[in-house]
Image (cartoon, rainbow, N blue to C red):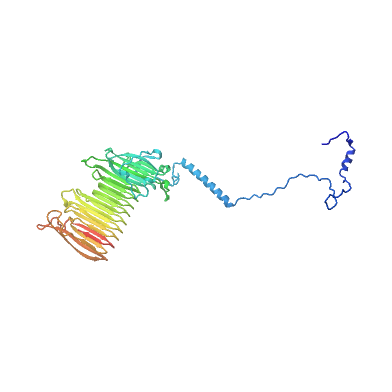
Amino acid sequence: MIIQTEDTPKTPLLDAQQLPRYLASLDTPLQTDSPPAYYGSHGPYVPQGPPQPYIVGELPLPAYKHERPPTSRRFLCAFFVTVFIWILLGIFLRTLIPWSAGWGNDKTRWGYDIPSGIAISGCMQGDNWNAHNLRTTENDIRNSSLARQPNDFPYNSLASFSLPVDSDSLFLLGRGQLSSGTLDIITSPEQPRDSVTIQIRVYYSQESARQLVKLCKLAYNVPDKPNGVGLFTPQWRNGESYDDKKEDQVMFETTVILPEICNGEPPLHIKEFRADAPSTTHRFGDLDKKIHFDSVTLNGLNASVEVTSLSARVVHFEMKNGSIRGKFNATDSVVLSTTNGEIDVDVGLEYRDGAKPALIARTSNSPINADISLASASRHASDASYVVSATTSNSDLHLRFAAQPVDSRLDLSASTTNGPADVSVHPAYEGHFVLQSSTGALIHEEKDVRDPSGYRRERHVHFRELQSGGMSVVEGRVQWWRHKGPRRHHDAGGTRRTDGIVSVSNTNAPLTFAL
C-alpha cells in the first residue's frame, strides 16, 4: 500500500504515448556508482540484476517400480483360496444331498445287492427309524472279536418288524460293504405266540451314514407273504472298491425274538430259520428245550457262530474265516463248515425211524474239538446207523464219543495234516479200524471195560501194523463175544451188518486211538 500526504510531490499520470517509453526504460540496466565495500568483505560489491521471475512448475516425482510377487507365492494363494471354497461347497452340498460323501449320488457306480428270487414288500430308509432304546438282556453281551463295538459310535436308531411264527421259512438277509454286526436268536415270555419279532439297531457316526441303510421286508418262495427281513448297504459295481472312512461305517445289532413256552409244554415248532449275513457274529441262546426247528441254515463270512444250545432236524452252517462253537442236537444231520476258524462243539445225534444221522465238521488251519453222543429213539438199536466225518489241516483233531447204542453202526472218517490226531470211541463200538500216520499210531485199550449191553460179554481187540508208501498203517477189529450161543446179525462172510468202520489219518504228528 502507498501512503500519500500533502507534502508528497504528485507524480503526473502517464498518457498513452508516454507509457511505452516508460516500460522500455525499465529494461535498461541501472547505472550507478559502486557503493563502498561491505564491511568485512574482501572484494568490491557486485551489483545484482533485477530479480528473476519465480517459475512455478511441477516437481518431478521419483519413479515407483511396482514389483509383482513371485509365481510360487501367487500359486499357493490361489490354491488355498480354491481349497477353502471347495470345503465350503462340500459342507453346503452335504446338507442338501442325503448321501455319504464317500459314496456320492452316482448310482451307476454303486447300488444295493438284492438276490434274485427275493420279493420286496416294502422298505424303510432315512428318517423312518425309531429312536426307542429297547434292548434285551442277552443282547447286551458284547463280542470282543468284533473290530468295532457299539460304544465306538455316538448315535443309534431302532427299527422293528413282525413276522408270522408259522411261516414256511423265517430268514434274515444282509448285503453290502457296510453290513456288519451281531445277530442274536433268543426267546422271550413277552413275545406273542403267533409272531416273531426282529429288532434291528443301527449304530453310526453321522446322519449321512444311516441314510445309506435300507431295511426291507422280504418274501421268499411266497411273494404275497413276507417272511424275512433284509439289511442292505451300498455295494460298489464293476469291481470298484471303497476305503471306508470311520464316519461312513455302521454296525447292526439284530435280535430275533421267538415265543417262549411255559414249563412242561413241548418245544415250539418252527419250520425253517435261515440267515445269510457277512461280517456278522451269530449267537443262539438256550433254545434246546424251548424251540425245535426243522432246519437251521447259516451262511457267514469273517465272523463266528456261538450256540448255547440248539435242537433241529437239520443244522447246516457254512462260514468262512470264523469259528463255530456250541451245543447241537439233531435227528438228521449237522454240517459245520468253515475256514481259518476253530470248531469246538458238543453234538448229539439221535436216530429216528430210518434216517441216518450224520455229523460233518470241516475247517482248515484251525483245530477241531468235538464231543459226540449217539442215541436212538427206535426200539431196535441194531437198525441205528451214524456217519461222522471230521477234516482239518495244519492243526489238531480231537474226537470223543461219549455215548453209542449197543448194536448200532458207526462210520467215522477223521483226518488232519501237520497236527496230532486223537480219537476215542465208546465201548459199545464194534467193527474195523484203520489208522494211518507218518509217525506211527498209538493204541490205548481199556482192558476191564464193562459190557454196555449188560450181558457180561467179553471184548476182543486185535490189530496188525503195516508199512505202505512211507506211512505206518494199523488195521484192526473190535468185537463183543458171548460165552455161550451164536452171535447175532452175521452175514455170510462172518461180518455183522452192524459192524462199523473207523478211519483216522494224519501226518507229521502223533496219532492216538483209544477204545
Residue 385 image offset from top left, x and y in percent: 20, 52
Position of 80 with respect to 376 (left or right) is: right
Q: What's the residue at 86%, 34% (across, down)?
A: 5
- Residue 434: name its quadrant: bottom left
Q: What's the residue at 26%, 53% (across, down)?
A: 360
- Residue 125: name its quadrant: top left
Residue 144 image offset from top left, x and y in percent: 34, 49
Residue 100 image offset from top left, x and y in percent: 44, 44
In the displayed orientation, state which residue is furthest to the front. Answer: 39
Position of 326 with respect to 482 (left or right) is: right
Nearer-the-camera pick, 434 or 45 = 45
Count every numbered label the image shows and give the total.
Answer: 0
Task: Note whether residue 314 is visible.
Answer: yes
Q: What's the residue at 24%, 56% (across, down)?
A: 399
Quarter of the image that includes the N terminus: top right
Position of 103 with respect to 163 (left or right) is: right
Residue 425 image offset from top left, x and y in percent: 21, 56
Nearer-the-camera pick, 93 or 57 = 57
Quarter of the image that includes the C terminus: bottom left
Task: Note whether residue 168 is visible.
Answer: no
- Residue 451: name its quadrant: bottom left
In the displayed orientation, state which residue is furthest to the left. Answer: 484
